[in-house]
Image (cartoon, rainbow, N blue to C red):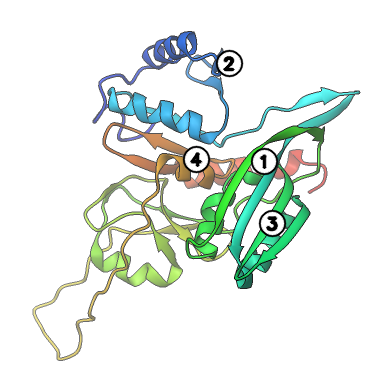
């Protein structure tokens, strides 16, 4: 239902996407495709985010257009209780950054089982739910300025460890369709980090940046400078627009919240809200609050 539907890809119908996924499942034993109640939605089970991002990259190069939602782990039932996969995470960081990693791993329900200091670097080992690792790598790379070395592998299924907080930063969402204007982006730079550049085509409901606060912000990125026939000294502000944060497919999947999608086309990787209209999102949030007994 994207406004950019069918503009870049050759294969855009759900039937064509379904056929391509089933062809992939025939030759990839680690991939499983299931139909859902909706004829336009398919459940694809894979071994990790890298696995699915390779498939997505191949499909977009072949000319497919599709959207992907937030990745979810596969739960099991053990002894009548809900269980989830737990992985062994090993981390190697400079000594002064080890506290940052330990603190963040704890918020993701990670238990530290080993800690060793060797000269200027610290070796850490955690048992952490697979849910907690979604988005962990990109967040830690930014927090440690790329000085972290990490590796994780499957350990075992353990009983469900409780809820893990989603991304703490909200989204900056485009209010109107049209091309992004440098004047508007320059005025909004203190609100967060942008994923787009001036001149990019936007649509209503597209996520164009990460907000500094935890709620979402609607902005008018098409607002041009008001021109007049009078010029005054010093009335023009110098525009210095920071370069946008560009994400790979893997990083975009890890970044998503439950109400967001990655839109993948042969030429673009865009983030968007599941419901493009702001009023629809408000109504859905109100319904979710009413149906949630803990709220």
Query: How packed is label 4: few (under 14 Cα within 10 Å), some, or many (20 or more)?
Result: many
Nearer the observer: mark 3 or 4; the answer is 3
Q: Is residue 198 above or below residue 154?
A: below
Please, which residue is most extreme toward the bottom here?
A: 233
| Residue hosting label 4 | 253
| Residue hosting label 1 | 131
Instruction: Pick whichever, 196 or 187, lies toward us.
Output: 196
Name the residue located 73 percent from the left edge and 28 percent from the top edge: 75
Which x, y percent locates residue 227?
Answer: 15, 73
| Residue hosting label 2 | 36
User: For the residues marked 2 and 4, what is the alpha-carbon distance in whole angstroms?
Assistant: 21 Å
Marks 3 and 1 close (CB-CB < 8 Å): no
User: For the residues marked 3 and 1, what is the alpha-carbon distance in whole angstroms?
Assistant: 19 Å
| Residue hosting label 3 | 124
User: For the residues marked 2 and 3, what is the alpha-carbon distance in whole angstroms?
Assistant: 41 Å
Which quadrant is home to the N terminus? top left
In the drawing, does residue 81 fall left or right of residue 36? right
Which x, y percent locates residue 84?
Answer: 76, 33
């Amino acid at each position: 239902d994207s406004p950019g539907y069918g503009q870049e890809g050759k294969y855009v119908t759900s039937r064509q996407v379904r056929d391509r996924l089933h062809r992939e499942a025939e030759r990839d034993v680690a991939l499983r495709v299931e139909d859902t109640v909706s004829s336009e939605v398919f459940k694809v089970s894979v071994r990790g985010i890298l696995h699915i991002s390779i498939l997505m990259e191949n499909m977009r190069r072949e000319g497919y257009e599709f959207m992907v939602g937030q990745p979810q782990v596969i739960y099991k039932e053990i002894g009548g209780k809900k269980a989830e996969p737990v992985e062994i995470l090993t981390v190697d960081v400079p000594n002064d950054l080890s506290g940052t990693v330990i603190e963040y791993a704890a918020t993701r329900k990670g238990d530290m089982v080993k800690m060793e200091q060797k000269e200027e670097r610290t070796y850490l080992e955690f048992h952490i739910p697979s849910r907690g690792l979604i988005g962990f790598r990109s967040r830690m790379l930014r927090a440690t300025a790329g000085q972290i070395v990490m590796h994780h592998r499957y350990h075992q299924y353990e009983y469900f460890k409780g809820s893990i907080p989603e991304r703490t930063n909200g989204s900056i969402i485009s209010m109107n369709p049209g091309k992004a204007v440098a004047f508007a982006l320059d005025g909004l730079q203190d609100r967060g980090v942008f994923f787009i550049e001036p001149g990019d085509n936007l649509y209503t409901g597209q996520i164009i940046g990460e907000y500094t606060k935890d709620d979402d912000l609607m902005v008018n990125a098409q607002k041009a400078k008001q021109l007049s026939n009078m010029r005054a000294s010093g009335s023009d502000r110098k525009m210095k627009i920071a370069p946008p944060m560009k994400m790979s497919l893997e990083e975009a999947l890890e970044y998503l919240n439950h109400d967001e999608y990655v839109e993948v086309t042969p030429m673009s990787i865009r983030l968007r809200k599941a419901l493009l209209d702001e009023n629809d999102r408000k109504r859905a949030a109100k319904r979710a609050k009413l149906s949630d007994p803990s709220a």
